[in-house]
Structures are given as structure tokens and as C-alpha cells.
Amino acid sequence: MKDDRMLDVIIIGGSYAGLSAAMALGRSLRQVLIIDSGLPCNWQTPHSHNLITQDGEKPSVIAKKAKEQVEKYATVKFQKGFVVSGVKTAEGFELLTENGEKYQSRKLILASGIEDIMPRIQGFAACWGISVIHCPYCHGYEFKTRKTAIMANGERAMHLASLVHNLSKDLTILTAGQASFTKEQSDKLKTHGIAVVEKEISKIQHKNGWVQQVIFNDDEEMAFDAVYAAVPFRQHAGIPVSLGCELTEQGYIMVDNFQKTSVKGVFACGDNSSMMRSVANAVATGNLAGAMANKELVDEQF
Ligand SMILES: Cc1cc2nc3c(=O)[nH]c(=O)nc-3n(C[C@H](O)[C@H](O)[C@H](O)COP(=O)(O)OP(=O)(O)OC[C@H]3O[C@@H](n4cnc5c(N)ncnc54)[C@H](O)[C@@H]3O)c2cc1C
């Protein structure tokens, strides 16, 4: 598809946040283009939880339903592709896709999610979202009372342990190296009967993504049903940075209460700008970003 028009809004990313923004804009008769490369972060997870009306639904089914509803708004168009760069122009923004297509818009919404960086542990990536999980709210209930590991250290491990302990008392923290707990933290873990294993992990043995054993570098094995893990992430492509959007210390796009980034006319929503990683949050922030982009256009035109 080639579109030489100056569009009202381009949305980068057509998953939960992007579709939610598009719905608000489509209902406001805005000319919108969603450019999406079609790889949401939860693609491997069999069931998505903790979103009212969709609890336990397959992630792809939620996205399909959302897309079908947005497609009913004639001013919203879709383009499959990956945006590689974006620049500010006199009138707004110009984006370039990896296929060399250029698109222009007055406003820009970044709904591009984040890219999880998998550790180099054999079996980890295959279990990600199935039995190696990131969030007790999304998957904790399904693994309640089961044999559970937390792959983390220090503050992060304490935070996860405090949440997960309410769901399973059979908890072990795997620090994969020297534990970095204060005396107070170690005492707390002991009080709650949470073991700490400091050995490096070499492999996660699994069946179709379902964890069976964690294997350490001395070949010792421990059986678990679920492993919580906090993995590092980065922004998809360098667009937020090349446009000049400020990032937080943790690497999220900095936004205000109205999803505005530090660059005028650029909004961000969903995982790329929030620590609260959930479909519900992506939908809520996307909806707000769409409304605020529309408001900015209204203020400029009315
Ligand atoms: C394994 C896993 C399981 C999860 N389970 C749950 C759960 O059970 N319940 C829950 O509420 N939440 C869950 N989450 C969190 C939830 O999936 C995310 O919060 C949600 O997907 C965020 O939506 P988003 O639209 O911001 O990003 P994403 O859904 O990740 O979508 C980003 C979209 O942008 C596209 N994109 C990125 N860069 C570009 C570019 N440069 N050009 C074009 N397109 C681009 C991608 O291809 C993708 O389609 C889970 C997350 C993970 C990782």
C-alpha cells in the first residue's frame, strides 16, 4: 500500500494498545494508518488472564476480535510492515518502513511494545509464557500451590517472592550466582521457608514448554512446575530515541498522565511506556493516547 496523503495519525504497532488507540480515533473520524509487524510479546502464551470479559482467552483471539471491531471504522487503514525510522517534519512526521515505503502524519502514536531479551539458558525461550512466566497476576493463579521457582536476585526476587508466596508456599529462589540479599531480607526468606539456590543454571528441561527440571551447571536437577523470571528488555527499533523521546531510567518511553511523550505530537501507550505489563493496561493507555491525539488535532483545527 502506498499512501501519499498527510494522515491525521499513524500508529506504530497494531496489537492491544495500538488497536485501542485506533478505535478512539476511528470513532472520531480521523484518517489513521496502523503499521504493524504482527509479533506481539505474548504470542507464545496459550491463555491470557486477568482481563475482564476475556479471562482465559487465547491472546490471538482477543487481538482478532479487537481488529475486527476496529476494521468497521472506514477511516482506519492497516499496513503490515516494520517501521525502521521516523523523522519530524514541518507538518508532523515521516516514517519509513523496512520495505522502503514512506508515510506521513500530523500525530504519531507509538504502540510498539517491548522486546524481551531471553537469557542464554537452553529451554528458557521455549517455556516463555507457558510455564516460565513474568507476572503473578497473569499466570499465578494457574500455578497456585505448585512447586515454583523464582529466577531473580536481590530486590526483584524479594518483590516477586512476596507476591508469589500468597499463591504457593513451595517456593525456591534461584539467584544464578551469589545471592545479594541484606541480612533482613535473608531472615525474611527463612521465616517464610523460602530456599535460595545460588548455582548457575545451565538448562531448563521441559515438555512442549512445560517445565520439568531446572538443571544447574554441576548437573544437579530440581523439579519445578513453574518458574518466574524477570528478563531485560529493549524498545523495538530505535524510533523513540531517533525522534528524541526521552526514556526513563528503566528504558520505558517517558509519558505524562495523558500518554504524551517529551516530543510534541508523539504519544506512547502499552508496554513501551509502562511497568504495569498487562493487556488491560495496554487497552486503557491506548484508548487514552487515541483520545489525546484527537484532542491535540481538535485544538489545532477548531
Ligand atoms: C509471555 C507473556 C505472557 C503474557 N500474559 C499475559 C496475560 O495472561 N494477561 C495479561 O493481561 N497480560 C499478559 N502479558 C502482557 C501483555 O501481553 C502485554 O502487556 C501486551 O501485549 C502489551 O500490548 P502492546 O500493544 O503494548 O504490545 P504488544 O502486544 O507486544 O504489541 C506490539 C506490536 O507492535 C508491533 N511492532 C513493534 N515494533 C514495530 C515497528 N517498529 N513497526 C511496526 N510494528 C511494530 C509488534 O509486531 C506487535 O504487533 C504477557 C506478556 C508476555 C510477554
Image (tube, rainbow, N blue to C red):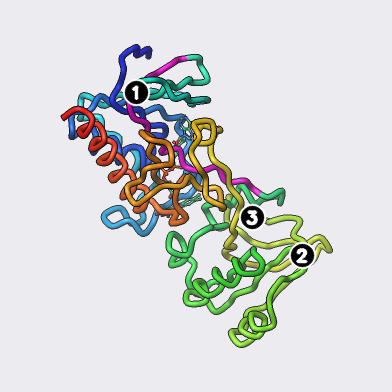
Q: Residue at x 38, y 23 (%)?
A: 79
Q: Is residue 259 magenta?
A: no
Which kind of residue does numbered mark 3 sit on?
Answer: His
Q: Is residue 84 above or below residue 15?
A: above
**Which x, y percent locates residue 189?**
63, 81
Q: Is residue 16 above or below residue 94?
A: below
- Quadrant hosting residue 111: top left
Q: Main secondary structure of the magenta part?
A: strand
Task: Look at the numbered disc 3 and give the secondary structure of its residue.
Answer: strand
Which kind of residue does numbered mark 1 sit on?
Answer: Ser
Query: Crowding near pointer 1: few (<14 within 10 Å), some, many (20+)?
Result: many
Identify the residue under disc 1.
105
Q: Residue at x 61, y 59 (%)?
A: 211
Can residue 65 be seen? no
Q: Is residue 116 above or below residue 210?
A: above
First in sequence: mark 1 vs mark 2:
1
Q: Which residues are magenta?
A: 101-118
Identify which residue, 140 or 255, lies in the foreground: 255
Query: Crowding near pointer 3: few (<14 within 10 Å), some, many (20+)?
Result: some
Q: In the image, ligand 1 is in what quadrant? A: top left
Task: Look at the numbered disc 1 and give the secondary structure of its residue.
Answer: strand
- Quadrant hosting residue 224: bottom right
Image mark for residue 206: 3
First in sequence: mark 3 vs mark 1:
1
